[in-house]
Amino acid sequence: MGMLINIFNAMEQVPVLIADIFSRYMIPAILCCIVYVLVLFFSNKVFDAVRKLVVLALIGWICVGLYRYRGAKGTLAPVALACTLLLFLAVVRMIRQIIVSTKETITNRRIEKQALAKAAKRRGSWKMRQGRSGPAPEETAAPAEGGAAEGEEAVTAAEEEENPAAERPLSRMEVQRCMDEMQDLKDKGVLTEQEFTRKKQELYMRLG
């Protein structure tokens, strides 16, 4: 019960502590607020590294506050402020991650749907061309085995000639594996958001 009262008292003292910090260290406090807001909403290789430093600094602040409180040299207000900042950072980052993941899922489904429609249309056009350019009925009555193989090779060659950029179709498992590898490269900062989206579209276009 006593600990709970101390926590409530510390939360009540947080506004006074913030006002005292800004009155005594205005410029450093403003710079810290700017850094906190930046790491709160933005993500890239630099901001991720700075965010880790901010988290470590807040944890260190909590440890120092607890040490001073146990030594009867201070209150729990700094600990309460640091815990609040950490909690707010975690909640905002979690919400942002949910929004980004949902947006990526919707985009992936839309790209996949368009790619599947184009692939089906492409396969249908190939079948129509094969039917139009196929041999006469009397010639297909008893085709030789070698002739059938040559016909398939000719159709494949014609398809590649008409669409020279065509590549081997990929299964959903292969596409997902490539997507995971690209996501890892994006998280490491190797791929930008634009490059990741473009390569993702290229992968879905190869979905068979």
Image (tube, rainbow, N blue to C red):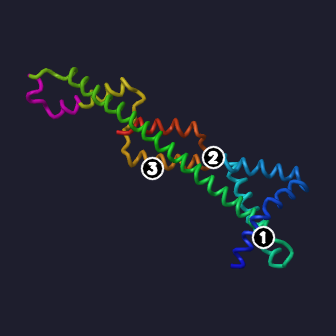
Badge 1 marks a residue whose secondary structure is: loop
Q: Is residue 91 left or right of residue 150?
A: right
Residue 19 placed where, x, y %? 85, 56
Q: Above or below — where is 101 with respect to 1? A: above
146 inside magenta stretch = yes
Kind of residue sitting beneath label 3: Arg
Q: Are marks 3 and 2 in contact (CB under 8 Å)?
A: no
- Which residue position holds label 2? 189
> From the viewer's perspective, is 207 left or right of 131?
right
* Magenta region, residue range: 138-151
Disc on the earlier residue, 2 or 1: 1
CA gap, disc 3 and disc 2: 19 Å
Could you tell me the amino acid type at mark 2? Gly
Residue 2 placed where, x, y %?
A: 72, 79
Give the labeled residue for mark 3.
177
Q: CA distance from mark 2 to mark 1?
A: 39 Å
Quarter of the image for the N terminus: give it: bottom right
Residue where numbered disc 1 is placed: 76
* Mark 2 residue element: loop
Residue depicted at x 19% and y 23%: 134
